[in-house]
Image (cartoon, rainbow, N blue to C red):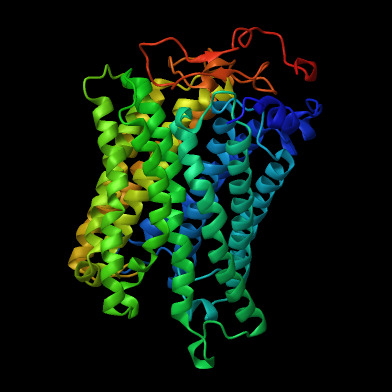
Amino acid sequence: MSTTAEHAGGIAGHIHPEPQGFIRRYVFSIDHKIIGIQYLITGFVFLVLAGLLAEIIRTQLLHANGGFVSNDVYNEVYSIHGSAMVWLVVIPIVTGAFGNIIMPLQIGARDVAFPWLNMLSFWIFPVAGLMLFSSFLMGAPVAGWTEYPPMSLLGGPGTSMWAAAIFLVGVSSTLTGINFVVTMFQMRAPGMTFTRMPLFCWAQLATAPLLMIATTALAAALAALFMERQFGVPFFDPTKGGSPIMWQHMFWFYSHPAVYIMVLPMFGAISEIIPTFARKPIFGYKMIAFSSMAIALAGFMVWAHHMFTSGLAPYLQLPFMILTFTIAIPTGVKFFSWVATLWGGKIHYTSSMMFALAFVALFTFGGLTGVFLAAVPFDLHVHGTYWIVGHFHYVLVGGSLTGIFASTYFWFPKFAGRMLNETLGKIHFWLFFIGVNMTFLPQHWLGSLGMPRRVPEYDPQFQTWNDVSSIGSYIMTLGILVFFVNVLVSMRNGKKAPPNPWGARTLEWQIPSPPHYYNFKHIPTVFGLPYDFSQPLPYKGLEEELTDSPVHAGAH
């Protein structure tokens, strides 16, 4: 990377003066930190809405004969729940929120490469969310978050609204991916080579191409579904020469990489949190960094393992099975590196660290059940059962959502300038951790016994474990409620955060909390990795950062 980063990108990307007035400062902001906070708040609002839909599902399943809502409403609820959690909660928070807030600070940039495009990326997102939830007013989709034809061709008008909404989310994600790639290639501080870049940035760098490339396959599928529903173009209707299997190929070519879009940034966050609270250098820095890229590449090669029951030819099933086993290797590299980092460390059990350790445990379990599903004979047995529901939620709730909480407790002092309450944080942790396991572990047993997924009524022999699962979901929800109380109270009355409350070493912790508008008065020079706690900080040019004087355009 050229040492002219400050002149090539840093200034040009953020030459505009600090905005005045509430609207320009906090609504239509072009400051990456404010945009990240907007993503975070909006994502948490949609988490509440999608979580309420989840509780409707679990309340319905408290009784074998259902009865809480009608069967048609149940189908709409679980379809919107899954869609909202994937496209309105997890992906926007792990990329749009934490990527925007933290990544430019960690590479020593004053903003992202295209601030106005960043603002546009955000404002597409809440509009798409409103469109998705408004589909309830016109007959919401009923075929699940995957919306397989021919069922999605027969659904109400809300299915077309669903397709348009998810298409817009894809546009937002693609723009964000482009912005992040250019930022990390062009705006790193002098001396910030790729092999000195923090692991969270490596994770965002691996995720950005997935946002740019995989999303186009989904966009094409959604456009085709919309055109078939609205104009009768026969893409997927087999009675008119279309192929419903084509939808599955296009959908999963996006949606398996999307699993890594949802979890790779959290891999990066965990790689920042564990060494900070173990007070040890991260073990295997380069292997962790390169394994993120390997996961991103391999994620494009395994989509058809979701289609073993679709009639996929046996000679195609075998290579997809082997490739799915193989993708566990770079993931395992990260987990063994985290364990090696913890070994012999002086561990500080903050709320952030507890959620990070829970992430390691829960995602490992979700990954192991994924290895089971990679085997064609086992997948044929459990594919249509609650085993899939349990596995998927261990990956996305035990993984992505747990990582989001770990990241929030870790970085909240930096972007909010206040400390979260650690006592409430630990209450949140134990309620959430117990609730997750009570909710989703029994679903594997239900699936192995043959309980089908996506049903509002079921055989009474499955009721006991469904009751346990539902009670667990209420406990988990109570934990999330404690989290929101903690955030709201701390925003107003929390202890003011020092610049570096955790003693961390990446660049974002070397400037005030919250950061100045321009992030850095002078772009720092980097001459080493940020993970060796026994050495001085590997930065030059930070001497004036912690003074109280604001940074103005003249500081350039």
- Position of 2 with respect to 203 (left or right) is right
**Dividing the image into 4 quarters, which one contains the N terminus?**
top right
Choose between 173 and 49: the one closer to the eye.
Answer: 173
Q: Quadrant of residue 426?
A: top left
What is the total number of numbered labels drawn onto the structure image?
Answer: 0
* Residue 280 visible in rendering: yes
Residue at image coords 48%, 89%: 238
* Residue 451 visible in rendering: no
- Say if 436 sits above or below 243 in the image: above
Choose between 258 and 182: the one closer to the eye.
Answer: 182
Residue projecting furthest to the front: 2
- Say if 479 sits above or below 315 in the image: above
Choose between 227 and 527: the one closer to the eye.
Answer: 527
Choose between 447 and 175: the one closer to the eye.
Answer: 175
**Dividing the image into 4 quarters, which one contains the C terminus?**
top right
Q: Quadrant of residue 276?
A: top left
- Say if 219 sits above or below 283 in the image: below
- Position of 162 with respect to 316 (left or right) is right
Q: Position of residue 477 (x, y in %)?
A: 40, 43
Residue at image coords 58%, 24%: 416
Q: Position of residue 94 (x, y in %)?
A: 50, 42
Q: Position of residue 11 (x, y in %)?
A: 73, 27
Residue at image coords 65%, 37%: 35
- Say if 335 sits above or below 465 in the image: above
